[in-house]
Image (cartoon, grey):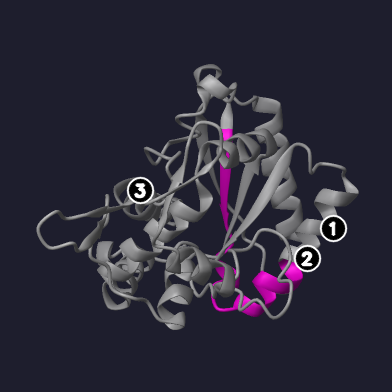
Amino acid sequence: LIVEERQKAWVQRLLVNLGICPFTKSVTTSGQGLRDLGVPSGKIAYHTSDATLHQPYLLMADTWQAIDEMIQAGPDGEDGGVSSILLAAPAFDDELDMWAGPVFALLETGVLAAQASSQVGVVCFHPRYATPDGTTWPGFGHMHSVPRLEAWVADDQYAGKDEQGNIIRKKKIKLKKTGAELETGSTTTTSLSTEDVAAGGAWQRRTPHATINVLRADQLEMAESRRDTPLLYRRNIRKLMEIGNHKLLSDLEKERDMRRNRNEPTP
């Protein structure tokens, strides 16, 4: 239970309070804001795998059992349906390379072999997550690469898209008295370094425990069509870097340390 509480504390802090995921409004439900596109909101199913580093087959079994339960439950929360899964595997908390590499390669192979890519998508989270540097393909389920995020963050002229999907850019207005030009809707922003952008991407994927996030494929597709991806990531990264690495690390460590703070014995 303490693992689930840690995960919920993270969901509340990062996804709900900071709005990092626009479709998660509580620790119990996700998929909000998509019903008009035919995607109902449903509950978040929290699972914990006791698989050790030498038992990746048990981790796969636990994951597929959770996926089967989600599919069998259906998508609509009003009927007890499940929108997404957060499956934690604490034994892998100190093994980012193994988690992000072989473990997710196994997951990808399993999804493809089961011909389940039309039903589910799997996303990688880890306490030490690192944003891919763009030199190699990290596999599916990972954060966008640093070069792509940098391009989005640097494009301060980008102001979203209109209803037809056309890109809107900030317009400049000329002041009558001085002749100076100002951008409409602009705000003062500080430039971010490559390290800042990489950190801003990573903090969106750093959870108290190594975590497999399973989403319904149709929800992923509709969410992608509803959200403005470049604008969302630019806002998220700037928001997180305004908070700062020190504060973000402190908050995550508090969540990871919940048992000791409550003086609960280790099971």
Residue lying at the far left of the rendered structure: 177
CB under 8 Å between callouts 3 and 1? no
Q: Which residue is mark 1?
A: 109
Mark 3–mark 2 Cα distance, whole angstroms, equals 29 Å
Q: Secondary structure at mark 2?
A: helix
Boundaries of the magenta span: 83-103
Q: Which residue is mark 2?
A: 105
The amino acid beneath tag 3 is Gly
Task: Kindly indicate the quadrant of the structure image that contains residue 2.
Answer: bottom left
Which one is earlier in the sequence, the residue at label 3 or at label 2?
A: 3
Q: Secondary structure at mark 1?
A: helix
Instruction: Give the residue displayed 44% in from the left and 66% down from the top.
Output: 153
Instruction: Give the residue displayed 40% in from the left and 58% down from the top.
Output: 157
CB under 8 Å between callouts 2 and 1? yes
In x, y percent, where is residue 125?
Answer: 55, 62
Instruction: Give the residue displayed 50% in from the left and 71% down from the top.
Output: 150
Q: Secondary structure at mark 3?
A: loop
Q: Which residue is mark 3?
A: 19
- For disc 3, the neighbor class at 10 Å (few under 14, some 14 to 19, many from 20) is some
